[in-house]
Image (cartoon, grey):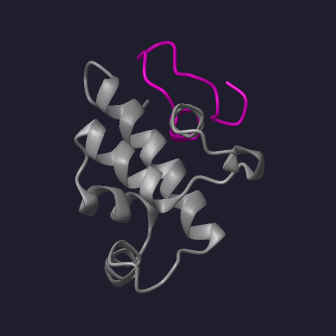
Amino acid sequence: MRGGYATRKQTGTLTIRKYAEQMRIQHGSDSRSIGMVTFEEIEAKRAEAGITRKALYEAAGVHKETWRRTASRKTAPNTRTLERLTRALDELVECKGEPNGSAR
């Protein structure tokens, strides 16, 4: 698995980056060249996976107010926040797919 961007064969789920890429292709967006996942894509994957917002922002180490302001579109998330959310979401999705519920 190269840097967490490949599909997770053991669980059959996609990482958020692969998911975002598929959504961009389906909807005709060419923003995939920048390689950054948007907050909206993270939020869509989170909802699809059945993971709570609180679980995601806590796992990512993102402050509740940062999440609230970003979700309400009062501020745009910085690159570091998006990367932390992406990593945490991938880990939570992988953990959810494990039979005993643990990531390791």
Highlighted range, magenta: 1-20
Task: Look at the image and tell me in which quarter the C terminus lies.
Answer: top left
66 lies left or right of 33: left
Considering every residue shown, the one lying at the far right of the view is 33
94 in the magenta segment: no
Q: Nearer the viewer, residue 38 or 2?
A: 38
Q: Residue at x 52, y 78 (%)?
A: 76
Q: Residue at x 52, y 38 (%)?
A: 27
What residue do we see at 33% from left, 22% from top?
98
Look at 27% across and 60% down and name the residue there: 53
Left or right: 64 as drawn, with respect to 61 = left
The quadrant in which the N terminus is found is: top right
Q: Is residue 101 rendered to the left or right of residue 80?
A: left
Residue that lies at the very extreme toward the front in this rendered image: 28
Height in image: 21 above or below 58?
above
Residue 85 in view: yes
Please state the horizontal and vertical placement of residue 39, each as a whole percent of the image: 47, 61
